[in-house]
Image: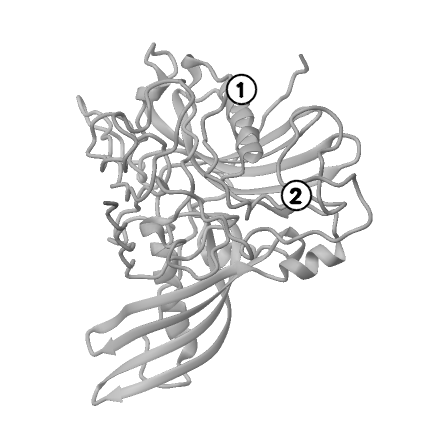
Amino acid sequence: MKSLPVLVLLSSAVLLCSAAPALEEVKCRADNNDAASRHAMHHINEHHQHGYKFKLDAVQDIKVDLHEENCAIELHLDLLETVCHVVNPKHFEDCEARQETDQEVIANCTVLMTVTTSGTTVDRYDCNTRQAKRHLMVRICPDCPVLISLNDPEGLKAVHDAVEKFHEQDTSERYYILQEVARIKSGWMMMGGMAYYPHFVLVETDCSKQSKIVPSACKPLCPDRAHHAYCRSSAIEELGLNSVDCEYYSPVNTTALGPGEQELICEPPHAHGHGPPPHGHGHGPPPHPGTGGPPPHGHGHGPPPHAHGHGPPPHAGSGGPPPHAHGHGPPPHAGSGGPPPHGHGHGPPPHAHGHSHGHGPPPHAHGHGPPPHAGSGGPPPTTGIEGSSQERVLFLPPPFFPPHHCQRLQTDPDPAIHPICSWPHPEPPLTPRQS
């Protein structure tokens, strides 16, 4: 079996938490859009708990409604997704925007704020997050990798293999578990079949690597006290795992524990269980014991079924609401919101909507490029991985939803990206009771 070194980038010395410049005072003037938009961007990134940080691209419009000494401001902003995950301590303004060739993601946001003599308050924002020029990029480069659903079974298998390799090579004192799948790209390789390029985040737990504890009992440390690892990997269908490259991020809170003090364990956030829980494959305790109904809320009795969403906010200590564990319902199989359809007439042989697990090119329906993974309309894929050992339980995320299931509240959700959820978070619709 070939040896596969894991490249570890010790980013704690390189990617130090940038000191954010002080926010300018927001004034009740239409020409004050720089200060108002910067205030809005800080608020958005502080409450964006999953996926990647965003930075300002342009202010499309600003409206100021004066009320004596106070005013209400309405901003229309264009945002760009950056390459910094939310666990990355780098300030969002110092992060590089994702390039068009790297499946660029954009957001259009409407932000409402109030300015008074005592300060500025963001009252609400709503954003439409989407891939930029997705269909155009497919026409320009039909065989280039595209983003696929965060629930894609083959993509999650590539995540599983990469996490296994991480555990084999990691020299940290504590055990890490999977916190989040950030994005997955997929494309066809002539000599190896489908290739998968997942990016994911691991979080440090309370378990020592020297202990005999079963990994399924490990709990993530509190977000501001945990080390995180952001990893990029690649795997080829016919050749297996190819590479795993990881960056480590130091905790935001580095205060040393006093004599006799033990590291605090944060209770997992409540999981909004609307829909059937994911089903495992017999590798460790079931995510939600009991019946097949909605999963119960987590109240700290044992580890969460999937460590997903425990990362620190972009700027810890802001006092914003805690992240919510997400994803106990079926994934949004978006027809138009999934990866784009493929053209016709060249590339690997045609291939229907699924994955061939044998050898040779998969049966692909449209002639080239990666398959359209979303939009099959079938049941949600299970996230357990066949063949994983009891001793190496992985915490693969359940079918993905951001906090409060904001994917479900969008008219055209894209299961391949982490959108900016509206704030304050709207409550998910009630599931009708079946008679």
Instruction: Please state the horizontal and vertical placement of residue 402, each as a whole percent of the image.
Output: 38, 49
Q: Secondary structure at mark 2?
A: loop
Please indicate, yes or no, whether residue 338 appears anywhere in the rendered image. Answer: yes
- Quadrant containing the N terminus in the rendered view: top right
Query: Within the image, what quadrant is residue 305 found in?
Result: top left
Q: Looking at the picture, which amino acid does disc 2 mark?
A: Pro
Q: Secondary structure at mark 1?
A: helix
Query: Along the line of sight, which residue is nearer the eye, 40 or 410?
Result: 410
Q: Looking at the picture, which amino acid does disc 1 mark?
A: Gln
Q: Residues within 10 Å of mark 2 (few under 14, many from 20)?
A: many
Q: Residue at x 30, y 27 (%)?
A: 219
Query: Along the line of sight, which residue is nearer the eye, 148 or 119?
Result: 148
The residues tagged by marks 2 and 1 sit, at their Cα atoms, a distance apart of: 32 Å
Check disc 2 and report the residue beneath it: 371
- Quadrant containing the C terminus in the rendered view: top left
Marks 2,1: beta carbons within 8 A: no
Return the disc, 2 or 1, that comes first in the chain's sequence: 1
| Residue that lies at the very extreme toward the right in this rendered image | 346
Please indicate, yes or no, whether residue 9 appears anywhere in the rendered image. Answer: no
Query: Within the image, what quadrant is residue 215 found in?
Result: top left
Task: Report the side of 114 relative to 4 (left or right).
Answer: left
For discs 2 and 1, the disc positioned in front in the rendered view: 2
Instruction: Please state the horizontal and vertical placement of residue 122, each as a whole percent of the image.
Output: 29, 68
Q: Residue at x 72, y 45 (%)?
A: 369
Query: Within the image, what quadrant is residue 373 found in?
Result: top right
Q: Residues within 10 Å of mark 1 (few under 14, many from 20)?
A: some
Coloring scheme used = one colour
